[in-house]
Amino acid sequence: MGEEEVRKGLAGVVADYTAVSKVNPESNSLLYRGYPVQELAAHKSFEEVALLLWTGELPSEAELTSFEAFERANRALDSRVQAAIDLLPLDCHPMDVGRTAVSVLGAAHPLAEDSSPEAELDKAKSLFAQFPAVVAYDQRRRRGQGPVEPRVDLDYSANFLWMVFGEAAAPEVVDAFRVSMVLYAEHSFNASTFTARVITSTLSDLHSAVTGAIGALKGPLHGGANEAVMHTFDEIGIRADESREEAAARAKEWMEAALAAKKKVMGFGHRVYKHGDSRVPTMKAALERMVAHYGRPEMMGLYDGLEQAMDEAKAIKPNLDYPAGPTYHLMGFDTDMFTPIFIAARITGWTAHIMEQRAANALIRPLSAYNGVAERHLG
């Protein structure tokens, strides 16, 4: 018998079919249910994109109105979730808070053990509506601030920012945030999505699958890169009185030294894209708008310098996390909250995959090639 072929990290292994999303190699576009994500980010609300991912089609006006009413009625922070969060230390990572909150929401959901398609969609919609309050409360409690009640007159993105900062965001800020949520919503069989599908394949419940996905997303090789980008900016030094060109020169010098020292710099490269992350131009344009809105050209300078130096030295392009991190920073989010925002977006993709896995389930149970000690016996 020949030696088994082992593909570390399941590289190149096609594990299943999915109709949720794909990267089209011909156009280098990420497609959600066939639609290029850059088109959705330009023209559709996050609520519309969520329904597209869950149902396979963009909603009718009546369907969208119904979902918006449901989402707005379910935004408040659950008192049981708030109590659980309050038990967690202020210095724990916010991803720990998100993981705990989803687990509590699952335990409390009246349809927790109902895995019918109708119940799964209800739970997905509820989690979509409930999670922004978790992010908002966690950032505010770490700053010594109390919770802000949601506003039913605002859409999802505007209300998210309202609950975090306690003031109405400018329309251009709301729109940049909406764009980021659409771009982060889904990305096929990445590590956290595959984790969710593995858990679902055991016939476990939706909230357990999402909780496991959050655990996978917490890892810096998957979801922490947007935070790492800001840590890089901080290490270089953000100087608000600096011009774009001056900041770019300092950043380029820093990157050249980092690469010479073989330092890993997060926010660049992607396992799926061969010609650059198709989401980056849209997110970079949103970052440019935020730089103009807040009058912070040095942030774009740091971006330019790092991007140019990496391209010249390695020909490696940025991924979505690279423009998203500084965009969230300019909006006022604490750096540790960037990946929980990612959760809020990716709940849509995760739950779409959970429902897809459930509909045509097979237990995911790969084999392993043993390379330990040969059979031996006691005595």
Image (cartoon, rainbow, N blue to C red):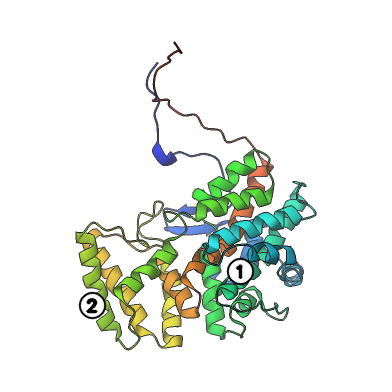
Q: Name above or below for residue 373 compared with residue 56.
A: above
**Residue 348 picture quarter:** bottom right
Q: Name above or below for residue 116 compared with residue 281.
A: above
The reply to whether discs 2 and 1 touch (Cβ–Cβ < 8 Å) is no
Residue 58 seen in this snapshot = no
Residue at numbered disc 2: 249
Nearer to us of marks 2 and 1 is 2
Residue 46, disc: 1
Crowdedness near tag 1: few (<14), some (14–19) or many (≥20) residues, C-alpha within 10 Å: many
**Residue type indicated by callout 2:** Ala
Image quadrant holding the N terminus, namely top left
Residue drawn at point x = 41 percent, y = 52 percent: 272
Q: Secondary structure at mark 2?
A: helix
Given residues 28 and 212, the one toward you in this image is: 212
Please state the horizontal and vertical placement of residue 256, each as a whole percent of the image. Answer: 21, 66
Q: Is residue 312 left or right of residue 88?
A: left
Residue furthest out toward the top: 379
Q: Is residue 47 left or right of residue 178?
A: right
**Residue 78 picture quarter:** bottom right
**Residue type indicated by callout 1:** Phe
**Residue 136 picture quarter:** bottom right
